[in-house]
Image (cartoon, rainbow, N blue to C red):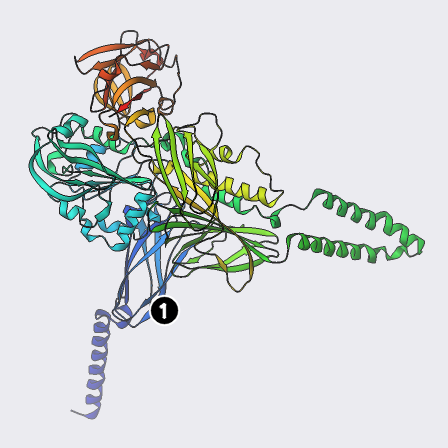
Amino acid sequence: MGSTTRAIAFRWASAAALALGLVMSAVAPSPAAAADPITMSARALLGGRYTVGTWLAISVSLANDGAPTAGTLSAPSATGDVLRAVDLPAGARKEVVLYVRPAGFTRQVIVTFTSAAATVARPVQVAGIDIGSTSIALVGDANGAIKAQIGDGVTGTAPFDVPPGDLPERPEPISALSVIVWAGDSGLLTDGQRRTLERWVAGGGQLIVIGGPDWQARTAGLGSLLPVTAIAAVDDAGLDGLGAVTGPLPDGVTTATVATGTLAADARTLVPLAATDARPLLASVSHGAGQVVWIGADLASRAFVGWEDGGTLWSRLIGIDTSAFFGGKTTVDEASAMTQALANLPALEVPPAELLLLIIAAYVLLIGPVSYFVLRRLDRRELAWVTAPALVILFSAGSYGIGTSLKGSQIIVNQISIIRSTVGGQAADVTTWAGIFSPSRATYDLTVPGDALLAAVATGADGTPLPTEQGDPAHLRGLSVNVFGMRAVRADTLVARESAIGVTWRLEDGRLRGTVTNVSDGPLADVAVVTGSVGRLVGDLAAGASKDFAMAAGDFTGASPADQVYGFARGDISTGEARTREIRRQVIVGLVGYGNGMPLATFGANGGEGPYVIGWHDEGPIDVEVDGEEVQRYAQSAEVVSGRPAIDPGSVQLRQVDIGSRVTATQGQVDVIDGRGAQILDGTATWTLSLPLEVRGLVASDATIHVATDPTSALVDQDFGGALPPGFTLEILDPTTDAWTDLGNVQNSSRFAVPDPATMVTPDGSITVRMTAGGDNPGAFGTFPIYVTAAVQGTLP
């Protein structure tokens, strides 16, 4: 072959090899197309449930299969992004938790990790909880039995499932929950999750623990929280005691393996194992404002799936959340109340009107007549174009100087700490509110120690978001403050701290009575007891001093708890003492709102309405620091202790707010509304009214049935005669004879005295009434809901 031929062949071979190489490179993966070295997944804890204004925890899993890198996790929050720095060595696997406060109606939060190696984003689904609703989380309800028993007829809102691992390691994200029903393995809980449960219960939460054959796993991590000790299983135990307080048990269920034991200190038996066995089948114990309930039978098992009468038990345990009807604390924006409290500073006062008038008058006179006559006398009126601007500059500088002298030239931090603790507890939740006052227009960076959750109360005036860096310490960058203006921030944290206040209290004859003791080493000022509708000033307490108090359980005068404590003269900030009083008034408003007139709800999941004991001092656990600046600091701290007043043997008064109400039977054309109300076109609706299990055995001496066309009116002790048209009949069942007794004309009254209450109210604490509509019934008037409840007074043995 000649050289020319060989050259041509070589060129063809090279071209073929190049083409093959291009094809192979297109098919084979290239380094540029390789998987990202950073992978991430994210999920919201508690099933993504949140309430506007509270924190939501998002757990983020990060993996680095590349070179070492560092980056930042971020997610949007109500007032700006939250950030957390993360180091990722090669091969690292990390779990990081971000805490955000979603804005209203948020359904999805985007979590992003940004580093030099990669940027990864993941959507996280969230769901809001209605403000004022009784939110119930179920842990370990694998069969859905408890969810079906509670439904939405006990509280008006359906419970939701939460895996045990979804419990956050700090209490702020679960503050919106009212009830947690625990039927899962608590041995998997971390120390942080256990502390979260303890602080949540102490703050007013209700933890209901299910026993049964799996009691060991379910109680392994709950320790001292439980109302029973030395627990053991009892096989083939009779369930007659349970049926007595709930109604018929599921078909075929008469015995079960139950877990029981010895009552813990201060615990009480709600239902005994049997008439001849005093060991508890149901028991409860209070911790701070909340309680833990033990149910020895496994209500989450398959045997209890479809238990129609289970709702009666849950209504007696959970109780009525009055805020669902009356707003309670939600009648006021807590942030708004605290911002008003922070604004009570001398530096933020408007200058005296007399001084403003004097300056304006001097300015008008000097730039007008005085300037004219002086220049005319000097025969230099052409200089007016020079003197007028000069006088403007002079008065502007003078006005600024006067303002500076009045308001000062130093940055001021006005700080209010709300320290929520428990009698005998070792930890406290702390919310520190701080107002940053600036004598000039400036931008500041803030730092807070203690792994606090820090956030601005609002975005900038122009809507500019304010990012915060989470960690220990936490940082907020770029807080802009106008000249002589104030911006508010808040920081939430958990600290090791014993309560400064001791309190013993009880509910007696419809009144709250007790004793407050200052157990700290220093004085406490303006000690007060407040609920959602009542406030009483106890007074100042020296170290070790005690004072008694007595107050009504409810107030219908319309006066707010803050007004009842500090009087009706509002807005006076003319003196330091007056400013302090207004700050403390606003803090009470932030705690319980402006008052709803409802009586104190002692039973069930109602800790958010108090009662609270509050006392004041100057010490604060954490300070909000302004980076690189020396500040003038005003600080006040409110020690807040909440609890559940004891129900002692003797006279007991139960109001409508304490009585459970459920529609348990219907006949004819009847629609049931949320399990508690009924629309009756032509037929009968039967209600079971249940007393709390804590007063089981009460001997009733007086009882009144209340009927209303809305749940709000049913809970108010007033007569709404004429609410129903003709055609309705109200009757009550005599359980000793199974006979129905007519209670009276429902067209003329909404309150009906119960004849022979000791008989009509069963020893197990239930009342059965029914409403019938027919004949001249109200179909022509249109249908509307009917609600029935009761008030009972008697003696507890």
Count of labels in the image? 1
Q: Residues within 10 Å of mark 1 (few under 14, many from 20)?
A: few
* Residue type of the residue flagged with mark 1: Ala
Q: Reply above or below: 696 against 231.
A: above
Measured as percent of width and height from the top left, residue 18 is found at: 23, 78
Residue located 28% across and 47% down the image:
197
Name the one closer to the observer, 348 or 683: 348
* Side of 201 relative to 551 (left or right): left
Residue located 78% across and 56% down the image:
389
Measured as percent of width and height from the top left, residue 446 is found at: 48, 59
Instruction: Give the position of the C terminus as an image quadrant.
Output: top left
Q: Reply above or below: 533 against 351.
A: above
Residue located 69% across and 54% down the image:
400
Name the one closer to the observer, 29 or 109: 109
Instruction: Give the position of the N terminus as an image quadrant.
Output: bottom left
Measured as percent of width and height from the top left, residue 554 is found at: 41, 28
Name the one closer to the observer, 253 or 83: 253
Q: Which residue is mark 1?
A: 116
* Side of 616 relative to 644 (left or right): right
Q: Secondary structure at mark 1?
A: loop
Query: Within the image, what quadrant is residue 233 found in?
Result: top left
* Side of 608 relative to 10 (left or right): right
Query: Within the image, what quadrant is residue 261 found in?
Result: top left
Camera sees residue 129: yes
Query: Within the image, what quadrant is residue 646 found in?
Result: top left
Residue located 47% across and 39% down the image:
588
Q: Reply above or below: 722 against 122.
A: above
